[in-house]
Image (cartoon, rainbow, N blue to C red):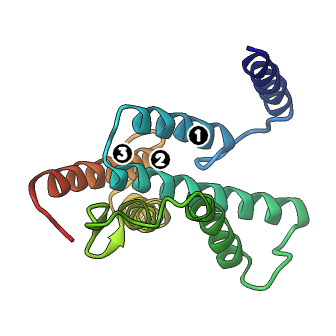
C-alpha cells in the first residue's frame, strides 16, 4: 500500500514538474511520448503480440531521439556532437532494448516460438517501428511538397497511420503464418 501511495505521489509531482516547464511543442513531443508509453503498457497488459508492442516501442524510441536531438540543437544553436542525430538515435534505441535484454526477455524459449525469422519478436518490432517512425515525417513532408498539405498535423497522423498499418500487417502475419 505504501509503495502505491509513494508511486502516485512521485507520478503526480513528476507530471506537475513536466507540465509546468513545458514549452510550445512540435510533432515529436514529450506528451506524445508519454501517451505512447501508456498505450504500450495497456497493449502489453491485454496480450497483444510482442511484435506489435515492439513496433510502438521502436516508434517511441525514435520519436524520443528526434525530440532530444531537436531540443539540444535549439538550446545550443547547433549540434554539440559529431553525428549527433545518429548518436542520440542509437543511444535511445539501446536504452530501449537493454532493459529487456538484462531482464532476460531475449533469452528465447526452447522452441524459439518468440522469434520472427530467427529474430526476437520485440527486437524485430523495435527495428521495424524505428524505421517507420524515422521515415514517416519526411515522407509526409514530401507528400506536402508535391500535393499540398491536406489535413492539420499531417506528419504526425501519417506516421501513426503507418505504424497502425504495420501493426495490423504484423498481427495478421503472426496470427496466420508460422515464421521462425
Q: Are marks 2 and 1 in contact (CB under 8 Å)?
A: yes
Q: Quadrant of the N terminus?
A: top right
User: In the image, 46: left or right of 64?
Assistant: left
Q: Which residue is mark 1?
A: 32
Q: Which one is closest to the eye, mark 1 or mark 3?
A: 1
Q: Position of residue 39 (x, y in %)?
A: 48, 35
Which is more N-terminal, label 3 or label 1?
Answer: 1
Q: Position of residue 12 (x, y in %)?
A: 78, 21
- Specify the quadrant of the image occupied by residue 55: bottom left
Q: Which residue is mark 2?
A: 156
Q: Residue at x 38, y 54 (%)?
A: 148
Given the current orientation, which residue lies at the most extreme right position?
Answer: 76
Given the current orientation, which residue lies at the most extreme front position?
Answer: 110
Q: Are marks 1 and 3 in contact (CB under 8 Å)?
A: no
Q: Residue at x 72, y 83 (%)?
A: 83
Which is more N-terminal, label 2 or label 3?
Answer: 3
Q: Position of residue 98 (x, y in %)?
A: 62, 65
User: Residue 4 or 140: which is nearer the viewer?
Assistant: 4
Judge the density around disc 2: few (<14), some (14-19), many (≥20) Cα neighbours within 10 Å.
some
Amino acid at each position: 500500500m505504501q509503495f502505491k501511495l509513494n508511486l502516485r505521489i512521485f507520478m503526480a509531482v513528476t507530471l506537475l514538474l513536466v507540465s509546468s516547464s513545458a514549452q510550445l511543442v512540435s510533432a515529436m513531443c514529450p506528451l506524445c511520448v508519454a501517451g505512447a508509453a501508456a498505450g504500450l503498457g495497456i497493449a502489453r497488459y491485454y496480450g497483444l503480440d510482442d511484435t506489435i508492442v515492439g513496433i510502438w516501442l521502436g516508434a517511441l524510441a525514435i520519436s524520443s531521439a528526434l525530440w532530444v536531438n531537436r531540443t539540444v540543437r535549439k538550446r545550443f544553436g547547433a549540434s554539440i556532437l559529431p553525428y549527433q542525430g545518429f548518436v542520440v538515435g542509437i543511444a535511445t534505441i539501446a536504452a530501449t532494448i537493454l532493459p529487456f535484454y538484462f531482464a532476460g526477455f531475449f533469452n528465447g524459449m526452447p522452441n524459439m516460438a518468440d522469434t520472427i525469422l530467427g529474430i526476437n519478436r520485440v527486437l524485430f518490432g523495435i527495428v521495424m517501428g524505428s524505421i517507420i517512425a524515422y521515415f514517416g515525417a519526411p515522407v509526409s513532408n514530401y507528400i506536402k511538397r508535391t500535393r499540398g498539405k491536406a489535413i492539420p498535423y499531417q506528419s504526425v497522423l501519417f506516421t501513426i497511420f503507418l505504424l497502425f498499418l504495420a501493426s495490423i500487417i504484423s498481427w495478421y502475419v503472426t496470427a496466420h503464418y508460422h515464421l521462425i
